[in-house]
Image (cartoon, rainbow, N blue to C red):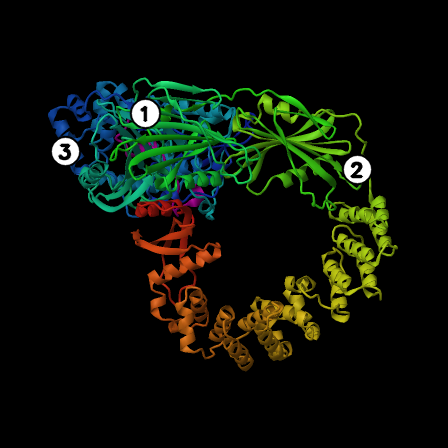
């Protein structure tokens, strides 16, 4: 940032227009606005821009012309006079040789110094000799008053533009050398320094403020000529201005050689014979003013910190990481403390942070440490604590405190946010110093939320035994040479009889009363790890009965593999830290255990720190031959047996042959399989076929991280790698076609072996035979398929009929399909199957004649009712203009008999098009005599009434026609309900009546609805229909017995529906207040949530309530009982609104992560709330 500009600093115009940046205009003479200039010529790809600024926060200066912000957006770089981040960093690293006021004393006589001191106190409110500043430039800037207004912005114009440039992710550059401006005062002669100081006394404070306002008004007009005239009225520009403009001109030209640039400089640098405009023109550039319009375009642009590139800081020594808006400066003290400080020039906010290492000191009580920090906070910052809350950082509890400073030295900086935590023997503090009202802004929140406490480097410890295990593929340090405690245990998998070996090694540190265990095991043959979360949960369950898990497990990483760290109490005595990793199909468990009650294990020790995974040992590869094909594997190979009863008629291949082999050194599993293609197999392209198989192999949680075409023995194939999104488990696949065989190999291995030599050797280890039958993958098989459908051989027919599920007919095949419908078949059953299959196939392939063909087929005398229903389902799906017209004609004039079970599909076009349903409603009512159709018509009518279409009221008068059979249907249902042969289709129609009544307008047809629902209430042991009937009666203001109402409200199973019905009926006052008290409704909300996610705990218990930021959170234990044991999980309900008739009726939000309940439920609740903050 430019601090000094020209020789005549007594001229205030120069102070404000040259030294510092700014921009904008007022309502005065906008036609003369000329602060933005376009630079063109000299082979520039895009125009660059020059903009005159002023370093003010006056809101009038922010009225940008329409072209300013788009100009920044359309250039590649953004320039200020000085690169702002470099300026701030160098300001903190300037040598601190002598206090600034002492430098002033040496330059001035006593009288002059006294005047400077008096002016300083008048402006700042304290004595200059109380200042601890070393930088004379900063201290001198404090001799000029800051005439702030309530309407002023929180930042300066140039910094505001910088914020937009950073939002647009422009490269930020400086036009001048930072040192030349930063050390301007220090590099000046003593006489010049003295002159600069005395110039500060030229204006008294009142005159200074008056002149400043006058200068702002000139600038706000944006009239560059007026600015030029004012400068010339004072002593002109001078040599210093000329020198600086030459430097800036050269910098702009240099930048424009490779990119376009928007240069924002003090407005006084633009005009005049030595101004930037003339200098650029003299260099051959075309420099023209940009037309100024003021339609509010600038309002479309916002400064968005989320789009800015922030600097990531990472301290490996102290184990923490965070982000700041830019690169921080480092300030070190004599005790070796490095404090990192970043000043954001856009908002004026300071971000700072540091870490103090107490690991070498014993006996520090974290609770007392926190209490002392909180106690001293207000005194330390001369303020008062406004808010204090506990937070969780890196798995440990810390604090976040907001402090308001009543009498700040800088009015824009009246607040401090202090975040601190103590973990692993290290104290971390993070500070934000700025405007109090901005302490919880997006920018500050981004800084705070970015803070992560990781693992610090371990303090050097005495030499331990380095235990290397080749087969286990790891190395770790232990207190002594470990004892081998490996053993065979009973397999946890019921369907395997193979040995299950746990490889375990143990070493005791008697001096420190600690025990260390490392164990590993592979999955049994036939098993692999494909769900890490389930694997972690399964391992955690093995602790049950042996140990108590404390708190929530932490997620950690080892050699790139995800793991969990558990804090345990083993048998209620031994405090332990357990770490668990899965490497491919191998499990590693590390345990550090204290052997004496009262002692606590620490995760920061050589055992955990030294654990490293190493390369697996090699396993010999051999060649196997199965079913006449050869492939590579390890010594032991096993076949995956297929179900003998498996019906493969609807697949494009015959029975498959699948094998797998296991690497005993690593636990990695490789699979090999192949199958013979059926004669109807046809594909468009190999790529499409392989893509389809990739989809079949993967599921929605998988990502194909890479895929490539390959050659396998001159056959085109595809190789691809799959990663499970949630836990980064990798697997690799190879697919290819070799004549009449489809062959596939796969690898389920550790991450580092996904592309190993062994993996590729096995996947590509297929050795072809020469006797395979040739096969044309692309030729039509339609004639063969249709001909074999006529076969009298039931097996031939079955395979041909099954081909409809995978064979893709082409449009050229449609006439053949028409002809096949009239062909002769071995049996009537076969013929009907073929016709139905062909009808359904028209949904995939058809031509312009298909609708007419199906209409003719439909009206033929020899077509059964089921096939008619199939045609009615297909016709609306055909993409022809007359399809719906034909569908409506056939359904309404030649209605097929209803199916016994499923009839929705016949009416689905009406459900999809409510206007069409309303238009045909009278015709549809003619189907009312069919009970199966009647049920669908009731459902359709309810949907019509719930829609937003205006003419839906047309169906209301037809209530009686639609419900004419309601008494008969209800009687049938009641009689059936009492019989042993109850058919649930009778219940469906009753529910559809109720849904229709629910949608029907209140106070209409009340008698029918009253009689119908009243009879349902008389049925015994019919809880859910009674509930629905009660809801309908409430909605229609029909009488409901108090006893029944109370019963339904008392039950958690039915209360929510009844409350919702009263609310919808605008009669919420009839619900007793005890049911919508906060605690009661929180419990009900939890009940609704559990039903939605289909969870049914054996019981639940209220743990208590937490109030955070004025909101109550209700914590519950969800308890599941299994075979005499209990598992408890945490659920939290957020009560963030009051129930009333005016408020939308909905449940409170329920938070769960299905982690085991900790004995420290409050801390766990706070952590869960923070984790789910986005959901809230």
Label 1: state its secondary structure.
Answer: strand
Relative to residue 103, is residue 725 depicted above or below? below
Image-based side of 1002 in relation to 1085, left or right? right
Residue at the image position 42 percent from the left and 59 percent from the top: 1087
Label 2: state its secondary structure.
Answer: loop
Decide which of tag 2 and tag 1 comes sooner along the chain: 1
C-alpha gap between disc 3 and disc 1: 65 Å
Q: Would you call the spot at circle 1 few (<14 residues within 10 Å), some (14-19), or many (20 or more)?
A: many
Asked whether 25 falls inside the magenta stretch, the response is: yes
Of residues 914 and 653, the one nearer the viewer is 653
| Pointer 3 residue | 127
Asked whether 414 falls inside the magenta stretch, the response is: no
Residue that protrudes farthest toward the bottom in the picture? 1007
Residue at the image position 26 percent from the left and 32 percent from the top: 596
Relative to residue 257, is residue 655 depicted above or below? below
| Pointer 1 residue | 508
C-alpha gap between disc 2 and disc 1: 69 Å
């Amino acid at each position: 940032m430019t601090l000094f500009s020209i020789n005549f600093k007594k001229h205030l115009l120069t102070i404000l227009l040259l030294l510092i940046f700014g921009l904008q205009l007022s309502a005065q003479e906008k036609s003369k606005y000329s602060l933005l200039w376009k630079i063109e010529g000299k082979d520039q790809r895009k125009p660059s821009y020059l903009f005159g600024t002023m370093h003010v926060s006056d809101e009038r200066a922010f009225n940008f012309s329409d072209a300013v912000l788009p100009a920044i957006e359309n250039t590649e770089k953004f320039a200020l006079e000085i690169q702002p981040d470099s300026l701030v960093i160098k300001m903190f690293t300037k040598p601190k040789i002598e206090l600034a006021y002492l430098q002033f004393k040496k330059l001035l006589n006593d009288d002059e110094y006294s005047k400077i001191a008096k002016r300083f106190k008048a402006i700042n409110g304290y004595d200059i000799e109380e200042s601890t500043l070393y930088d004379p430039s900063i201290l001198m800037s404090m001799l000029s008053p800051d005439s702030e207004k309530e309407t002023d912005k929180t930042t300066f114009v140039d910094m505001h533009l910088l914020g937009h440039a950073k939002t647009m992710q422009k490269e930020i550059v400086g036009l001048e050398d930072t040192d030349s401006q930063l050390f301007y005062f220090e590099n000046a002669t003593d006489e010049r320094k003295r002159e600069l100081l005395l110039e500060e006394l030229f204006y008294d404070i009142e005159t200074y403020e008056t002149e400043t306002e006058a200068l702002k008004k000139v600038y706000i007009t944006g009239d560059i000529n007026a600015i030029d005239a004012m400068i010339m009225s004072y002593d002109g520009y001078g040599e210093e201005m000329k020198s600086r403009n030459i430097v800036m001109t050269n910098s702009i030209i240099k930048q424009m050689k490779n990119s376009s640039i928007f240069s924002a400089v003090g407005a006084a640098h633009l005009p005049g014979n030595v101004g930037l405009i003339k200098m650029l023109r003299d260099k051959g550039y075309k420099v023209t003013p940009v037309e100024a319009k003021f339609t509010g375009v600038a309002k479309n642009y916002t400064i968005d910190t989320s789009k800015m590139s922030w600097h990531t800081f990472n301290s490996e020594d102290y184990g923490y990481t965070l982000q700041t808006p830019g690169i921080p400066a480092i300030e070190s003290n004599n005790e070796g403390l490095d404090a990192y400080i970043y000043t954001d020039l856009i908002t004026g906010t300071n971000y700072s942070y540091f870490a103090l290492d107490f690991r070498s000191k014993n006996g520090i009580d974290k609770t007392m440490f926190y209490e002392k920090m909180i106690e001293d906070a207000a005194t330390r910052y001369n303020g008062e604590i406004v808010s204090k809350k506990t937070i969780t950082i890196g798995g440990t509890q810390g604090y976040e405190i907001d402090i308001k400073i009543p009498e700040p030295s800088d009015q824009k900086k009246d607040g401090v946010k202090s975040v601190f935590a103590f973990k692993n023997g290290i104290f971390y503090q993070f500070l934000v110093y700025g405007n109090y009202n901005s302490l919880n802004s997006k920018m500050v929140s981004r800084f705070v939320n970015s803070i992560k406490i990781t693992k610090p480097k371990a303090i050097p410890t005495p030499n331990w035994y380095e235990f290397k295990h080749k087969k286990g593929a790891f190395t770790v340090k232990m207190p002594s040479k470990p004892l081998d405690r490996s053993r065979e245990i009973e397999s946890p998998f019921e369907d395997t009889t193979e040995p299950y070996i746990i490889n375990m090694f143990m070493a005791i540190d008697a001096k420190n009363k600690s025990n260390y265990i490392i164990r590993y095991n592979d999955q049994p043959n036939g098993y692999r790890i494909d769900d890490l979360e389930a694997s972690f949960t399964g391992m955690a369950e093995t602790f049950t009965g042996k140990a108590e898990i404390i708190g929530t497990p932490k997620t950690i990483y080892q050699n790139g593999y995800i793991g969990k760290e558990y804090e345990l109490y083993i048998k209620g005595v031994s405090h332990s830290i357990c770490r668990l990793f899965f490497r491919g199909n191998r499990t590693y468990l590390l345990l550090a255990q204290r052997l004496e009650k009262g002692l606590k294990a620490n995760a920061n020790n050589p055992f955990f720190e030294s654990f490293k995974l190493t390369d697996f040992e090699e396993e010999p590869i051999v060649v196997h031959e199965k079913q006449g094909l050869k492939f590579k594997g390890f010594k032991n190979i096993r076949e995956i047996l297929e179900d003998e009863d498996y019906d493969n008629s609807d697949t494009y291949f015959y029975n498959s042959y699948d094998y797998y082999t296991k690497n005993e050194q690593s636990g990695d599993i490789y699979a090999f399989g192949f199958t013979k293609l059926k004669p109807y197999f046809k594909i468009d392209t190999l790529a499409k076929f392989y893509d389809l198989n990739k989809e079949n192999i993967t599921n929605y949680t998988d990502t194909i991280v890479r895929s490539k075409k390959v050659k396998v023995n001159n056959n085109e194939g595809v190789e691809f790698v799959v990663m499970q999104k949630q836990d980064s488990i990798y697997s690799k696949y190879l697919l290819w076609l070799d004549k009449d065989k489809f062959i596939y190999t796969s690898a389920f291995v550790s991450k580092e072996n996904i592309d190993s030599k062994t993996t590729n050797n096995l996947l590509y280890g297929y050795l072809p035979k020469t006797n395979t039958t040739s096969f044309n993958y692309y030729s039509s098989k339609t004639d063969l398929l249709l001909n074999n459908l006529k076969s009298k051989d039931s097996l031939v027919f079955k395979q041909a009929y099954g081909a409809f599920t995978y064979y893709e007919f082409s449009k050229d095949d449609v006439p053949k399909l028409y002809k096949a419908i009239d062909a002769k078949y071995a049996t009537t059953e076969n013929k009907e199957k073929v016709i139905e299959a062909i009808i359904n196939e028209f949904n995939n392939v058809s031509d312009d004649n298909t609708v007419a063909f199906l209409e003719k087929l439909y009206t033929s005398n020899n077509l059964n009712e089921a096939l008619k229903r199939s045609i009615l389902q297909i016709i609306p799906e055909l993409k022809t203009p007359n399809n719906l017209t034909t569908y409506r004609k056939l359904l309404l004039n030649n209605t097929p008999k209803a199916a016994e079970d499923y009839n929705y599909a016949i009416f689905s076009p009406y459900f999809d098009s409510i206007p069409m349903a309303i238009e045909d409603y009278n015709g549809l009512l003619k189907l009312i005599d069919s009970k199966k159709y009647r049920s669908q018509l009731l459902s359709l009518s309810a949907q019509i009434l719930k829609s937003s279409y205006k003419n839906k009221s047309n169906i209301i008068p037809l209530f009686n026609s639609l419900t004419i059979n309601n008494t008969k249907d209800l009687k049938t249902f009641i009689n059936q309900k009492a019989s042993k042969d109850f058919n649930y289709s009778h219940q469906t129609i009753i529910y559809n009546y109720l849904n229709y009544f629910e949608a029907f307008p209140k106070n209409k047809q009340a008698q029918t609805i009253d009689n119908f629902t009243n009879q349902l209430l008389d049925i015994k042991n019919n809880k859910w229909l009674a509930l629905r009937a009660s809801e309908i009666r409430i909605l229609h203001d029909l009488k409901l017995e108090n006893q029944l109402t109370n019963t339904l409200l008392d039950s958690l199973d039915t209360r929510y529906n009844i409350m919702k019905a009263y609310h919808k009926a605008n009669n919420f006052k009839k619900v007793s207040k005890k049911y919508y008290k906060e605690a009661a409704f929180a419990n009900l909300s939890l009940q609704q949530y559990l039903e939605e996610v289909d969870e049914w705990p054996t019981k639940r218990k209220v743990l208590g309530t937490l109030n955070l930021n004025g909101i109550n959170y209700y914590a519950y234990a969800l308890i599941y009982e299994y075979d005499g044991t209990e598992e408890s999980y945490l659920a939290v309900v957020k009560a963030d609104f009051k129930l009333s008739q005016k408020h939308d009726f909905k449940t409170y939000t329920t938070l769960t992560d299905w982690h085991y309940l900790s004995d420290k439920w409050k801390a766990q609740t706070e952590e869960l709330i923070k984790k789910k903050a986005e959901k809230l």
